[in-house]
Image: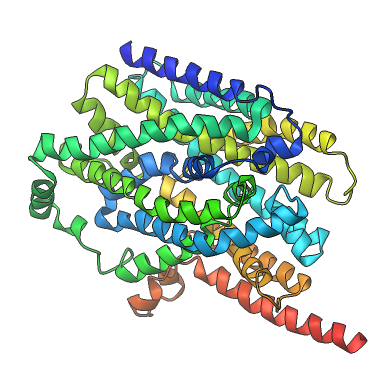
Amino acid sequence: MTALIILTAFFLLTLVIGIRARQKQKMNLENWAVGGRSFNTVFVFLLTAGEVYTTFSFLGGSGWAYSKGISAVYVMVYIALSYVTSYFLLPLIWKYAHEHRLVSQSDFFAKKYDSNLLGVVVALVGVIAIIPIVVIQLKGLGIIVSLTSYGTIPMQVAVVVGTIAIIIYSVISGVRGIAWIAVLKDFMILAVIVFMGIYLPIHYYGGIGQMFDQIATVKPELLTFPHTTYTVTWFISTVLFYVLGFYMWPQVFASTFTAKNARTFRKNAIVSPIYTLMLLFVIFIGLAAVLQIPGLEGDASDLALLQLAMKTFDPWFVGIIGAAGMLTALVPGSMLLMSAATLLTKNIIYSYKPNTPDAKIASLSKFCVPILAIISCLFVFQGGNALAAILQVGYSLIVQLCPSLFASLMKNNPVTKQGALAGIIVGILITIFISNYSMTLATLLPDAPTAISDINIGFLPLAANVIITLIVSLLTRKKLESRI
């Protein structure tokens, strides 16, 4: 009962903070979607962190460490390296978006390539990629609330109630409500994860070093990269792949537009990699559970953190842990749904009506938030793979925007709108095919050495994307030049 009271109190606090954020604010499209482009360094940092440190970081990261060991470090490495790239990449995106008053990722591509059709395709890719990640948040929310309430709240009820809360404060306050909730979320998650990551190894093993010593004795395979599947080759290729896709997510891309100036990103790029060290404590928690909560397999490995917490702490602290975990679902989940709704409305439904009043677009965007939320709920209730697997699918889809984005930032863009369009479509089709059949390069090239077969399969559709983009761009440019 104590845990339930704490969970309920934080849930209501979150709802109040999210709703009150709209006070004295006129919720036009620009203010609702990108905060009137007025966020300072702190808010942009917290908003970005709110999108990055999700239920995957909370449950999936520890679950990966529990089941596959030290290879879970890839999460920390790719996020830190992505922040480094932001120092150079985000000011360029912000400057162009600020000059042209853009409010979505699709706007950026459509304007850069002067193609409404490309804008529509980018929006579709964004919406399709977002849905699996929303599913991660809602699935994680249900698991966290159900377990930390000691079964008092069924998973399905937690998902539905959490979704309703997301809809309410997202529709009412937009990105401002999410940013203020992110303040509470980041302080809570930092305190809870760091404490658990230090306390649990000391409590059960006498220290972090002793924990590694005991795991090395009982399960040494968890402390080294295996010779197949999750090898060093897989690690390096997966880190590079995720770095490429990190800022391709529509909600992360659009959060760039909220900043006051380009200096904001350079300041964040200096601080953010340090904040990523928090994920090291998530890994410590997952490893601490290996010998204390044995026998978790498959999807159940995502429960390692919560089951160890329930074994160790009193109900009141379990409630606080549950509240922190709940916030890791509510903040990114709402930002994802808002981004998807804006893309769906502005860049798909009204894509060929550029003079549509912003008020009309904003109204329909708010209406689309609950529709997309309901669709995501249905996917949650259909079941699903482990969180890390779902995340891989989303990244494989969204990374297809990389070639055309990077080319558009060059002084002389070598890619035409036809090339960009063809490359993205081919990449998406191949991604859907290999995801549907759970393919890896090892299954496609069974006789290849591990240095090749263990490369992240996501590079296959990305390579096809680049080749098609360059070929079609070359052909269409020559055709255009011949007409001139």
> Which residue appears at 30% of the width and 69% of the height?
232
Image quadrant containing the N terminus: top left
Q: Is residue 132 above or below residue 319?
A: below
Task: Please indicate, yes or no, whether residue 382 appears anywhere in the rendered image.
Answer: no
Image quadrant containing the C terminus: bottom right
Q: Is residue 336 above or below residue 374?
A: below
Task: Find residue 436 and report its image quarter.
Answer: bottom right
Residue 274 % position (x, y): 35, 51
Q: Is residue 246 left or right of residue 20?
A: left
Q: Who is closer to the viewer here, 326 or 103?
A: 103
Q: Is residue 208 left or right of residue 157?
A: left
> Which residue appears at 56% of the width and 74% of the height?
463
Q: Is residue 114 above or below residue 381?
A: below
Residue 137 % position (x, y): 49, 37
Furthest toward the bottom, the residue is 482
For the image, the number of numbered tags is 0
Q: Who is closer to the viewer here, 367 or 33?
A: 33
Task: Find residue 373 and report its image quarter.
Answer: top right
Residue 104 % position (x, y): 70, 49
Q: Is residue 99 left or right of residue 52?
A: right
Task: Please indicate, yes or no, whether residue 390 appears anywhere in the rendered image.
Answer: yes
